[in-house]
Image (cartoon, rainbow, N blue to C red):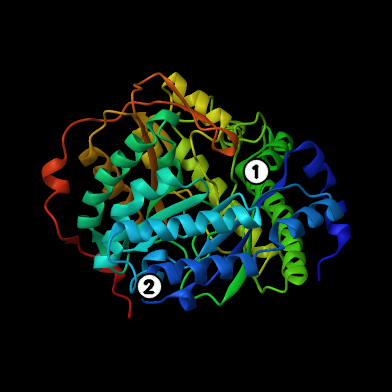
C-alpha cells in the first residue's frame, strides 16, 4: 500500500525539480453509443462523457491540493471514433459532427484535451475509417480540444501504404486550414505504428477496445528530477549513472501510482496504468535534452546521442517496473522538439537534424514528435517520413510515431509558436528529394519475418 509518507519523501522533487503528474486521463468506452443515426450518436456521446467525467477536473484539483502534487492536465480518451461512427456516418461531414460533440463534452466537463478521434488501419482502411481520415482537416480546424491519431502499421500486419499516402495530403490540408495559427491543427494529430491501447498522453491517446467501460490512467513527468539526480553522477561510471536514473524513475513512478489510485478511489473508476514517460516542457530545467547533455554530450545531436538515449530509456523503464505492477502506455523518454528547451536550442544551432532525430526514435518511446518543417514540404515527403518511422516501429517491435507541422508561409530558420505545453520550435530543413513514386505504389508493406511467432 502507498501512503502520504512516500509523497513527503519526494517534496524536494516537486518543489525544486519540476516533478509533476502531467495528466490524469479518464478513458471512456463509447461502443454503446453507436446508433444508425449520427445525431443520436452525438447525443449519446455527449451524455456519456459528461456523466462519467463530470467530477474529473474537480477531483484532480482536490488531489493536487491534498497531496501537494502538481497535476498539469486532466484529459479524456474515448474509443476510436471510426468504430463508434461506422454505422451512422455516411460522409466525412457526419464524422465532423461527432468531433463537435466531443469538443462540446470536453468543454462542458472542463478537461484540457480529449483524444480518440482516431482510426486503426494497420492492414487496410474500411470505408468508415477512410471517411474519418478525410474528415481530419475540417474536424481539427473547427474544434479546440479534439486530438486525433491514425495507426498505419504494426509488427503483426505490416504497413498500410494507402493510408500513409493519404495522410501526407491530410496533414498538408490541416496545415492550410489552420495557417493563421502556425498550422496548429497538425499539433493535434499523430500517425502511429504499434500504437498502445492505454496511452494517457496526447495527441495519441485513445481508449482501446480491449479496455473496460472506463479507466483511470496517469502520466507522470520528471526530466527535471532525473537531471538534478545526475548532478551526483558527474564523473562516475555507467554503472553508477544507470543506478541513479533507475532509482529516480522508481520514486517518480511511486508518486504517479499514489495519484492514480487516489483518483480511482474518489471517482469510482478502475485504475489502469501508470505511464512514466519523461515528458519535457519548454521551461528551463525540465528537459530530456538537458539529461542527455549531463550524461556527457556537449549538445543533443552529437555523436553518442542515440546511445545515451537508449540507456536513459531503458533505465527509466526498469525503475518504473519495480515501482508499479501496472506500467503501460509509452513509458520512457519523449523527444518532442518544440516542448524541450535544450532540444529547441540544438535544432536551432543545426546540431540536431531530422536524420539524427530519426536515429534517436529507434531507441526512445515515440518518434518524430512536434517537429516544425517548412510549409512548402510536399505531401509525398511527409508520407515518406511516416513510412520511415512506421518501418522502424514494425521491424523493431516498438511504438513509433510522426507528429510534424508543415508551417504554412514559413521556412527554415523561422520560429513557430504553439503556446502552453506545446511550446515553440525552429523550422528545420527536410530532405526534399522526391519519394512520390514509392509512396504512391499503393497496397501494403508486409509484416517482417520475425512477426510470425504463433
Percent across and percent down for residue 337 are 48, 34
How far apart in space, not on screen, are marks 1 and 2 (Cα)?
Answer: 58 Å
Nearest the viewer among 393 and 305 is 393
Mark positioned earlier in the residue sequence (1 or 2): 2
Nearest the viewer among 181 and 75 is 181
Rendered residue at 36%/22% (across/down): 410
Which quadrant: the C terminus?
A: bottom left
Percent across and percent down for residue 63 are 80, 57
- At label 2, counting other C-alpha atoms closer than 10 Å, the crowd grade (few under 14, some 14-19, many 20 or more) is some
Q: Which mark is residue 241?
A: 1
Q: In this rendering, would 364 be left or right of 164? A: right
Rendered residue at 35%/21% (across/down): 412
In this view, which residue lies farthest toward the bottom? 454
Quadrant in the rendering for residue 177: top left
Query: Of circles 1 and 2, which is in front?
Result: 2
Which quadrant: the N terminus?
A: bottom right
Q: In this rendering, would 136 be left or right of 446? A: right
Q: Which residue is mark 2?
A: 37
* Residue at disc 1, secondary structure: helix
Q: In this rendering, would 107 be left or right of 310? A: right
Quadrant in the rendering for residue 269: bottom right
Percent across and percent down for residue 200 are 57, 58
Above/below status of 335 relative to 269: above
Amino acid at each position: 500500500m502507498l501512503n502520504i509518507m512516500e509523497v513527503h519523501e519526494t517534496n524536494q522533487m516537486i518543489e525544486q525539480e519540476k516533478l509533476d503528474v502531467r495528466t490524469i486521463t479518464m478513458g471512456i468506452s463509447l461502443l454503446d453509443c453507436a446508433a444508425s443515426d449520427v445525431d443520436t450518436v452525438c447525443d449519446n456521446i455527449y451524455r456519456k462523457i459528461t456523466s462519467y467525467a463530470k467530477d474529473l477536473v474537480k477531483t484532480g484539483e482536490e488531489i493536487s491540493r491534498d497531496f501537494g502534487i502538481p497535476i498539469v492536465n486532466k484529459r479524456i480518451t474515448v474509443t476510436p471514433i471510426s468504430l463508434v461512427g461506422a454505422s451512422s456516418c455516411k460522409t466525412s461531414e457526419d464524422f465532423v459532427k461527432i468531433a463537435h460533440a466531443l469538443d462540446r463534452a470536453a468543454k462542458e466537463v472542463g478537461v484540457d484535451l480529449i483524444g480518440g478521434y482516431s482510426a486503426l488501419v494497420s492492414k487496410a482502411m474500411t470505408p468508415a475509417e477512410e471517411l474519418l481520415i478525410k474528415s481530419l482537416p475540417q474536424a481539427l480546424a473547427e474544434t479546440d480540444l479534439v486530438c486525433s491519431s491514425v495507426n498505419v502499421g504494426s509488427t503483426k500486419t505490416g504497413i498500410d501504404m494507402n493510408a500513409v499516402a493519404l495522410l501526407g495530403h491530410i496533414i498538408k490540408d490541416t496545415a492550410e486550414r489552420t495557417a493563421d495559427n502556425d498550422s496548429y491543427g497538425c499539433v493535434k494529430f499523430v500517425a502511429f505504428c504499434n500504437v498502445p491501447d492505454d496511452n494517457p498522453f496526447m495527441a495519441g491517446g485513445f481508449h482501446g477496445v480491449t479496455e473496460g467501460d472506463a479507466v483511470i490512467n496517469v502520466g507522470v513527468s520528471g526530466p527535471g528530477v532525473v537531471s538534478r539526480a545526475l548532478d551526483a553522477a558527474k564523473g562516475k561510471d555507467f554503472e553508477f549513472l544507470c543506478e541513479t536514473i533507475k532509482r529516480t524513475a522508481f520514486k517518480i513512478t511511486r508518486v504517479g501510482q499514489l495519484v492514480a489510485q487516489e483518483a480511482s478511489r474518489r471517482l469510482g473508476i478502475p485504475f489502469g496504468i501508470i505511464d512514466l514517460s519523461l515528458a519535457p516542457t519548454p521551461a528551463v530545467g525540465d528537459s530530456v535534452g538537458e539529461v542527455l547533455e549531463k550524461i556527457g554530450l556537449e549538445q543533443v545531436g552529437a555523436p553518442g546521442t542515440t546511445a545515451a538515449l537508449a540507456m536513459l530509456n531503458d533505465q527509466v523503464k526498469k525503475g518504473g517496473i519495480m515501482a508499479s505492477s501496472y506500467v503501460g502506455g509509452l513509458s520512457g523518454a519523449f523527444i518532442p522538439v518544440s516542448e524541450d528547451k535544450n532540444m529547441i536550442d540544438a535544432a536551432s544551432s543545426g546540431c540536431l537534424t531530422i536524420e539524427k532525430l530519426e536515429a534517436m526514435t529507434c531507441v526512445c518511446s515515440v518518434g518524430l514528435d512536434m517537429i516544425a518543417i517548412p510549409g512548402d514540404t510536399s505531401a509525398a515527403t511527409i508520407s515518406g517520413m511516416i513510412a520511415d518511422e512506421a518501418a522502424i516501429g514494425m521491424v523493431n517491435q516498438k511504438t513509433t510515431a510522426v507528429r510534424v507541422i508543415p508551417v504554412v508561409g514559413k521556412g527554415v530558420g523561422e520560429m513557430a509558436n504553439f503556446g502552453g505545453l506545446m511550446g515553440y520550435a525552429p523550422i528545420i530543413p527536410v530532405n526534399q528529394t522526391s519519394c512520390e513514386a514509392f509512396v504512391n505504389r499503393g497496397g501494403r508493406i508486409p509484416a517482417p519475418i520475425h512477426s510470425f511467432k504463433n
